[in-house]
Image: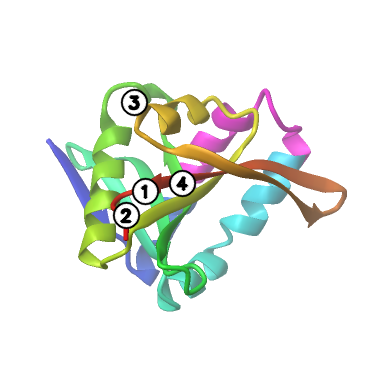
Amino acid sequence: MIEIEQIRPAQVDVIRELAEQTWPHTFGEILSKEQIRYMLDWMYDIGTLRDQVQSGHLFYVIKEYGVPKGFVGLEPNYPDADYLRIHKFYLLPEVQGKGLGRVLLNHTIDLAFDLELKRLHLNVNRYNKAIEFYKHVGFDIIGEEDIDIGKGYLMEDYIMELVLFKS
């Protein structure tokens, strides 16, 4: 049985735990161990995640038979741009390719429709294998950006968009 649960501020530790399990697999061949650790500590700090939930970010965990298997982190109208921004989208390695990503994305699309938002946006590392998943489900690459995140580290990303309906 598959279920999707919205995360409240007191539950963000599950997001951190899933990130710790997914990031080494996702980025192990792309980034150094030091950069992965730096980014996990920066982006998945429990206090930061709680602040994000309290300020309007939406986090959902997908569970299979009650066991967390992945998550999505969203920001509506980022920033006042009439789209739903996907900041985080990760599945445990053992469930990738088994349809859970599609279920979680469909939930995200439903939420965008509920919020009357016309597009989904995300950034993805230019060397991440997930690019093929995003293209397969209809996202297009609309740009590139390099983001200096400190300590000499750089995020080299594609900007991708999925148009849900035209204005």
Q: Report the residue marked by disc 2.
A: 166
Q: Secondary structure at mark 1?
A: strand
Amino acid bearing label 2? Lys
Q: Label 3 neighbourhood size at 10 Å, few (<14), some (14-19), many (20+)?
A: few
Q: Label 4 neighbourhood size at 10 Å, few (<14), some (14-19), many (20+)?
A: many
Could you give the CA–CA distance between mark 3 and mark 4, rounded to whole angstroms?
24 Å
Q: Report x, y in % for residue 83.
A: 41, 62
Could you give the CA–CA distance between mark 3 and mark 2, rounded to whole angstroms?
33 Å
Q: Which numbered disc, 4 or 2, marks the residue closer to the eye?
A: 2
Q: Report the residue marked by disc 1.
A: 163
Q: Secondary structure at mark 4?
A: strand
Left or right relative to 144: residue 124? left
Q: Report the residue marked by disc 4.
A: 161
Choose between 136 and 16: the one closer to the eye.
136
Mark 4 or mark 2, earlier in chain: 4
Bounds of the magenta segment: 17-34
What colour scheme does the image use?
rainbow
Amino acid bearing label 1? Val
